[in-house]
Amino acid sequence: MFKNMCYVRRKKERDKTNVKKEYIAHKKDTDEKIQTIKEHSDNTAKLCEQYIIPELGNIGYVLGKTHDIGKYQQGFQDKMDGKPIRIEHSICGASVVREAYMDNPIGLMMQYCIAGHHSGLPDGGTANDDENMSTLYGRLKRKTEDYSAYKTELELPDTDWQAEVKFLIRDCRQDDLNLIVDKFAFLTRYCFSCLVDADSEDTAHFCQEPPYLEEMTSDFAACLNKVNNRLQTFVVQTELQKARSVLQKQVFEKIHKEAEIFLMNMPTGSGKTLCSVKFALEKAIRDKKRRIIYVIPFNSIIGQTVKVFQNIFGEDVQILRHQSTYSYEEEGKGEDYKLIVKHATENWSADFIVTTMVQFFESLYSNKRGKLRKLHNMADSILVFDEAHLMPVKFLQPCLQGVAFITKYLNSEAIFLTATMPDFSKLIKEYALPGSKVENLIDDVSAFTKFKKCKYEYIGSIGMEELLRKSKLSASSLIVVNKKKTAQELMRLCTGKKYHLSKYLTSYDIERILQDIHEDLEDLERKYPGLRNVPPEERITIISTSLIEAGVDLDVETVFRQMTGLDSILQAGGRCNREGKRENARTYIFELGGEGLNQKENLTKGLLEKYEDISDLKCIEEYYNRLYAMEREEIEMQSIHNDYQNIRSIGFKTYAEKFRMIDSAGISLVVCRDEESRELMNELRYTGVVNERKLQKYTCSISVSEWNDLLKQKAIDDFGTGIYCLTNLDYYDVNLGITFEATDYFL
């Protein structure tokens, strides 16, 4: 009897040990349901393989299979059981890949991706880095627990990656190591994007209730039909209307052309936006592209562009408006819709996206999981860059090269749209990819002369009082200056009906003021047809910094522009006599007494003296040629290969920190003036957590020294969160913005 009991006990123990162990990747908090590492790895491998371009073969599959190998460590499994353990798992998969494909560039590419799939793509570092360093070399030296159990469940394909290596060096001369480094870095970020989105998607499908979110979709065929209907309503009678039709016809006749990058140089008032969106829709339908991504230079004009599209397309389009200053919660739609938008914002899975240059290019050159996640969804797209010339000169090389890589290797097409086009064909050849196929959509520029709606006149140095006196001679005038404090000072000196725009104002107030300006200008036109005999007290003066120049749809009688780059002057001039209804319209270029000129401003001044008409295409061409020649050294310094000439030591993290399209010298300051904003500030004050996207529209920009001043005056506080709020509203004026002149400022 006793022997039988012992036998039964031993048999039970044997059976227990024979039960296959479940290795857990994720566990739901709600019902303790588990997802095994094998399930998650298989799903991620399939998704990543689905996302990645065919030329990269098995890379997506291998990345998905290996990225979570480190979760086979016993420490991680203990963590899944609720033990408060901190354990690194990302480096294990990188080590496995290194062992399998050590001397292979594709293996190295995967090491970067796997090691960084949570914390972000790391710097490569050097072989001398120790385990305490966060570089790839350093992290690969770290000791880990045994994770060999993965061998019982996961199998790696046996491949030599020859096809993938050939794709990596395709279009690169053997001696062009710079281009090889740049291309390797781009494809690494792309593969990383495929991996982290696949990883996130599978995890979300497991954790979410409901398990799947629908995407933001658009009917491109229906949208195109509406654009065509809109175009058919246009009257072609006046010389200007005929000129507009001639230019648009040139664009539409080239829809069948095969190219990677299209250049659409069209003057202000020629219907660029409508023309570009028709071209994009036609191309998307004809070439079977998944999405259209419309890239705008500034936050301030996205709302205007989105409104134009929504008015045309109606319910046939769901536009993802991706900008830092906008929150979809303002639309008052249900929670399901907010989740759909949140998901689309994270990975750009929407059909029609309107975003900023900053969002687009910083996503392209980031090293962070959250930003890079959307990169792979730039594939199979039509990319439209409105005001393309506003790509910052400093980052011209990486910006152009990034677009060239996307169009050449990710099956996308790009449209560069601007009224003052530099020679992008030359620039792309020089700074991006020599072999890119570029097509100019406007060959005949003779119609451009019909769009010269104002004359440009240099009036030399002038004082503020005289400048304002001259502006008051016009029924409506726009004064654009280079500095925010100059704009404020002019606003204080100005009398009568006046408006002020600068980054000292919150986005909320900028939008409000622009709306007021539009309404007042329209009222003025109605009350005084042709703007004749407008009494002085009814005349409108708008004082602004450069934020008004790119795409802000305003029409004033006269423009005054402080000396600056020629491109900015022409953009400001585009607000003068926009509709071409008035004769003898003028844009005056001036200098303010006592202010010197920088190199760019001196270049413009020289061209003003050389050319009778600075809007002449020859003048514009000379300006850009000389500008890029002046900035050549700075341009070439910003390429990733400049600092990292070896694929094993690429500084993904360091370069991402270096690539800042907006000067980080400015500091954002939250100004709370209504009930919603005050509630947000109180939420930040008492909980330390707040929806930062909601706060963006209440944010203005100040310099570091100005921030220090306000801090000394105890006018601002971050409540220990790092998000600074203006707590003394005496320092803010709804028409001037941050004033630095509160009643107690000097007490």
Image (cartoon, helix red, strand yellow):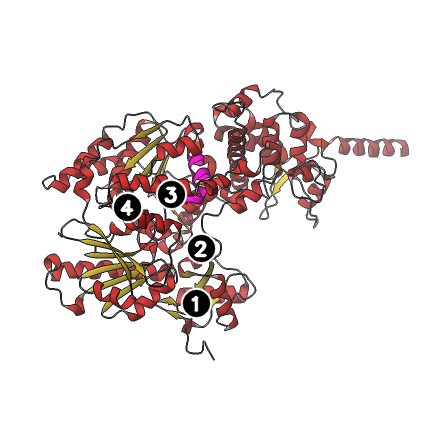
Q: Position of residue 366 (x, y in %)?
A: 51, 43
Which one is closest to the eye, mark 1 or mark 3?
3
Front one among 465 and 277 = 465
* 559 is higher (above) or lower (below) than 711: above
Q: Amino acid type of disc 4?
A: Gln
Q: Is residue 67 visible?
A: no
Which one is closest to the eye, mark 4 or mark 3?
3
Residue 553: which disc?
A: none
* Residue indicated by mark 4: 310
* Residue indicated by mark 3: 627
Quarter holding residue 475: bottom left
Secondary element at tag 1: helix
Q: Amino acid type of disc 3?
A: Leu
Confirm or deny contact between disc 4 and disc 3 (CB under 8 A): no
* Residue indicated by mark 2: 693
* Residue indicated by mark 1: 678
* 255 is higher (above) or lower (below) than 349: above
Q: Is residue 411 visible?
A: yes
Confirm or deny contact between disc 3 and disc 2 (CB under 8 A): no
Question: How much space separates mark 2 and mark 1, taking CA atoms?
Answer: 15 Å
Confirm or deny contact between disc 4 and disc 1 (CB under 8 A): no
Question: How much space separates mark 2 and mark 4, taking CA atoms?
Answer: 22 Å
Quarter holding residue 419: top left
Question: How much space separates mark 3 and mark 2, taking CA atoms?
Answer: 37 Å
Q: For the magenta stretch, what is the residue range?
A: 392-403
Q: Amino acid type of disc 2?
A: Arg
